[in-house]
Amino acid sequence: MGIPAFLAELRSVVGTMPLWLSGVSAVVLDDDGRVLLGRRADDGRWAVIGGILDPGEQPADAVVRECLEETGVTVRPEALVSVGVTPMIEYPNGDRSQYLDLVFRCRLVSGEARVNDDESLEVGWFAPDALPELDRRTHERIEHALAGNGAAHFELTEHRP
């Protein structure tokens, strides 16, 4: 699985040191209310579609790009549903990153979902009550998107007057 050119260049300087990066996640819904998931090539787990923002890229544009690149579908972002921070992630090559994760609820516009790059082993549409095994954070992303209450979810862990 390749990494963006800007990140490869940065890694050539900093090695495997932890990096703070911005990412997007897409909870894509079709007209039947099913959720689009991809089974990741790096760990074999099902997840929502997502990726890293390119320098200067708008987050909504990134979510559209990632969905097209990974699944061959065109989506329309409808709402920012969650803003959070991932735990530190260590990749098999030793690279470490933590992400500001912007989660968008998206609507399918066109295309047939398929594996469209080397980041996924398979992709598929799932009814919300028939999801495959997912990690807690992926479940939360989907729950926030399906809540549709118009407000983005965020966590406040430090209280100041």
Image (cartoon, rainbow, N blue to C red):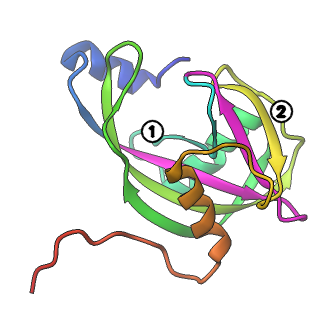
Q: What kind of residue is marked 2?
A: Arg
Q: What kind of residue is marked 1?
A: Asp
Residue 160, image x, y percentages: 11, 80
Residue at 56% from the left image edge and 17% from the top image edge: 1
Assess disc 2: are there few (<14), some (14-19) or many (≥20) residues with their C-alpha within 10 Å of its C-alpha: some
Dot 1 falls on a residue whose secondary structure is: loop
Query: Which quadrant holds residue 47?
Result: top right
> Of the residues tagged 2 and 1, which is closer to the observer?
2
Residue at 38% from the left image edge and 12% from the top image edge: 93
First to last magenta residue range: 21-42
Q: How many marks?
A: 2
Assess disc 1: are there few (<14), some (14-19) or many (≥20) residues with their C-alpha within 10 Å of its C-alpha: some
Spatial separation of the CA atoms under disc 2 and disc 1: 23 Å
Tell me the residue that label 1 is attached to.
Answer: 54
Query: Which quadrant holds residue 99?
Result: top left
23 falls in the magenta region: yes
Q: Is residue 48 above or below residue 77?
A: above
Look at the image and tell me whether residue 72 can be seen. Answer: no
Residue 108, image x, y percentages: 81, 57
Dot 2 falls on a residue whose secondary structure is: loop
Residue 63, image x, y percentages: 59, 50
Task: Determine contact: label 2, label 1, CB under 8 Å.
Answer: no
Which mark identifies residue 63? none
97 falls in the magenta region: no
Q: Is residue 116 above or below residue 2?
A: below
Residue 40, image x, y percentages: 63, 29
Tell me the residue that label 2 is attached to.
Answer: 114
Residue at 46% from the left image edge and 72% from the top image edge: 153
